[in-house]
Image: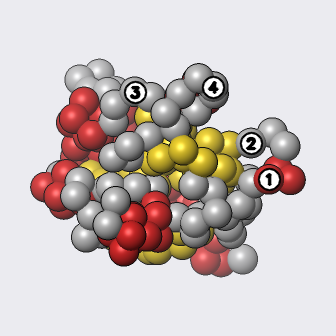
């Protein structure tokens, strides 16, 4: 009731403020940058806490929001030093995987895309266990189709479990 109305009124007021005072000299992106807006990104592999590329998120002002799991609609592959999370149309062999949701300042997303995301990985919508979606790391299907060096590691709970198993076996 009243709280929803108050929230809607604040958002409407903010949009009207933008429209009235900023539209002539600025873009919506610049307005969002000044407001300190953030975007949540799902980390699947080496960008997760304590792993080799986590420093990239931290250096760009990243904050860990939560550790969680994906919905059970993916398969996970190793592409050597990085994983590829691939959404499956046939979910009979799909599983859920441990991931982390990170929050990055909007102003740093371009740097992250330039330096932190390389083909055959990409950013897209990742479906989480609670039914919500966030932008996150995915693998392009061509990277895991035959012939390829991709290894299906779907039987692991996530990239961290796979890395730990490799360390334990000495490979």
Q: Say which label, 3 or 4, has the lower sequence index.
A: 3
User: Could you tell whether 51 is left or right of 124 in the image?
Assistant: left
**Labels 2 & 1 near each other (Cβ < 8 A):** yes
> Callout 1 environment at 10 Å: few (<14), some (14 to 19), or many (20+)?
few
User: Residue 35: in sight, yes or no?
Assistant: no
Please determine whether, in this image, residue 101 is positioned above or below residue 125. below
Q: In this figure, which residue is indicated by the disc labeled 1? A: 93
Mark 3 to mark 2 CA distance (whole Å): 19 Å
| Quadrant (top left/top right/bottom left/bottom right) for the N terminus | bottom right
Q: Residue furthest bottom?
A: 2
Q: Earlier in the sequence, mark 4 or mark 2?
A: 2
3 or 2: tag closer to the N-terminus? 2
**Image location (x, y in percent) of residue 71:** 70, 61
Look at discs 3 and 1 and give the one toward the viewer.
1
The answer for how far apart the CA atoms under marks 3 and 1 are is 25 Å
Q: Does dot 2 land on a helix, a strand or a loop?
A: loop
| Image point (45%, 56%), residue name | 44
Q: Residues within 10 Å of mark 2 (few under 14, many from 20)?
A: some
**x, y percentage for residue 78?**
48, 47
Mark 4 to mark 2 CA distance (whole Å): 16 Å
In this rendering, which labeled residue sits more in front, label 3 or label 4? 4
| Disc nearer the start of the sequence (3/1) | 1
Q: Which residue is mark 3?
A: 119
Q: Nearer the viewer, mark 2 or mark 1?
A: 1
Upstream in the sequence, badge 1 or badge 4? Answer: 1
Report which residue position mark 4 lands on: 146
Q: Position of residue 155 (x, y in %)?
A: 64, 63
Out of 31 and 14, give the one closest to the viewer.
31
Question: 73 and 59: which one is in front?
Answer: 73
List the residue tagged with mark 2.
88
Few, some or many C-alpha atoms within 10 Å of disc 3 (few <14, some 14-19, many ≥20)? Answer: few
């Amino acid at each position: 009731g009243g709280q929803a109305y108050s929230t809607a009124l604040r958002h409407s007021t903010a949009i009207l403020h933008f429209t009235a005072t900023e539209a002539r000299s600025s873009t919506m992106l610049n307005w969002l940058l000044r407001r300190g807006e953030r975007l949540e990104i799902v980390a699947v592999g080496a960008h997760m806490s304590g792993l080799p590329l986590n420093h990239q998120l931290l250096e760009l002002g990243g904050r860990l929001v939560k550790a969680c799991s994906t919905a059970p609609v993916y398969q996970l592959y190793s592409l050597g030093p990085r994983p590829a999370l691939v959404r499956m149309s046939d979910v009979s062999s799909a599983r859920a995987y441990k991931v982390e949701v990170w929050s990055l300042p909007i102003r740093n997303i371009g740097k992250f895309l330039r330096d932190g995301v390389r083909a055959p990985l990409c950013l897209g919508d990742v479906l989480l266990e609670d039914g919500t979606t966030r932008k996150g790391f995915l693998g392009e299907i061509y990277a895991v189709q035959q012939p390829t060096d991709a290894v299906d590691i779907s039987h692991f709970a996530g990239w961290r479990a796979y890395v730990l198993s490799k360390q334990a076996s000495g490979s």
